[in-house]
Image: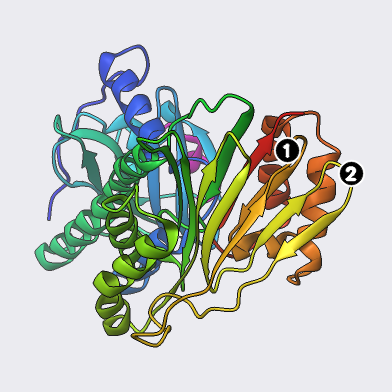
Amino acid sequence: MHSETATTVPVTGAPDAVRRAALLAALDVVEGGAEERFDRITRIAREALGVSGSFLNLAGETSLTIKSQQSDSHFGPVIPLQDTFCGRTLGERGPVLVPDARTDARYSDMPMVVGDPNVRFYAGVPLRLGDDDVKVGTLCLIDPEPRTLDADEVALLQELGVWAERELAAGADEDRLRSVLAGLEPGTVDVPGYRIAGLSVPHGVVSGDFHDWHRSGDDAVHLTVADVMGKGMSAGLLAANIRGALLARGDLAPDVAVAELEAQVAPDLSRAESFATMFHSRLTPSTGRIDFTDAGHGLVLQLRDDGAERILRSSDLPIGLHPAGIERASGSLVMRPGDVIIVVSDGALELWDSTLASLSQLGALYRGSPDIATFLQRVRSRAVDHDPGDDLTVVVVARDV
């Protein structure tokens, strides 16, 4: 098969370069190093087509980032775009075949041709994304010996390119999903004499945790933290189902709301062989009284204004495991001025030693912080340094002195 008559195109200053860079930034795949989902594609390309190197490249405004490479000679990971086959063929719609780069005036001056690794053969297919079909990079092959590809080999390379495009597009889907999930986070609520805030850090894209708070018609505050067993999409879907069932009963007493939602979601949890823990409560601001139902959660820390603390344990089974027809236990506590309640998912325990003693560590972190925002930022920072390996949720309710 003969070489495509590719024309060299400008690689800097063009509107396409700006669009490429913006799209790659939105995909959030350039940074972060190697990923198995891309390495799998380049491994197959190298082995199936029998070349010395295969690469998945992402083209920015003026530079090329090698996202994945399988090669005896290691490149990059960032190279000036004008010094690459990818950069010089950005205007091509289809596959580009260069049987012998040393005899091709378009590529013979490139550093990788005149020097190590002395590339002679190149083949690449464009990777295009977005509604405008913007070319954001290439899946390509190199070899130090002149050669070409037959029609079936070109078709295989194109199919691998489609696979790569779908993996890249998955980043955009995840971004859209993150936007949807961000919209499910509870908004700020104004409760005179109290401060309420929280954070949720998913282990993956989707969290099996959820938290919520809202004012009811009688000015009470309903607050919930729940944790579905497992991580990832399945746990996230179950959590969304439970959240919807709970919000439909938002103004009911905690024990009634939990009983009714359990009747609704228990069959789904059973089919998924899963369960969910939940702390669901109702705060009366005028008195500081919190009435709650704890369905196997047991991760509630009360910090008293006098320096004392206590952990509220649960005596009930999680939702989906609690025997049908058996009433759940209810509890209550009173927040005095200066008291703080911290409710977490079990990912918070993994920030320290995985035991309930971690709640005391969390309490010490709160007492050492000047405000709730700083405390939550310190929790988030600790999660970066001590990966909990699980979804993490922390909610704080503080009564002013």
Mark 1, Cα crowd under 10 Å, few <14 / some 14-19 / many 20+, is many
- In magenta, the rendered stretch is 109-117
* Element class at badge 2: loop
> Is residue 356 magenta-colored?
no
> Seen from this angle, which residue lies furthest top?
13
67 with respect to 379 (left or right): left
Tell me where residue 178 sits by quadrant. top left
Query: Where is residue 170 drawn, in percent x and y?
Result: 29, 51
Measured Cα–Cα span from mark 2 to mark 1: 20 Å
Along the viewing direction, whichever of 149 and 157 lies nearer the viewer = 157
Along the viewing direction, whichever of 357 and 119 lies nearer the viewer = 357
Point out which mark residue 306 bears. 2
Amino acid marked by disc 2: Asp
Query: Where is residue 223 drawn, in percent x and y?
Result: 49, 48
Return the residue at label 1: 375
> Seen from this angle, which residue lies furthest right?
307
Ranked by sequence position, the earlier of labels 2 and 1 is 2
Residue drawn where x is 28% and y is 59% of the image: 245
Residue drawn where x is 35% and y is 11% of the image: 13
279 with respect to 127 (left or right): right
Along the viewing direction, whichever of 189 and 1 lies nearer the viewer = 189
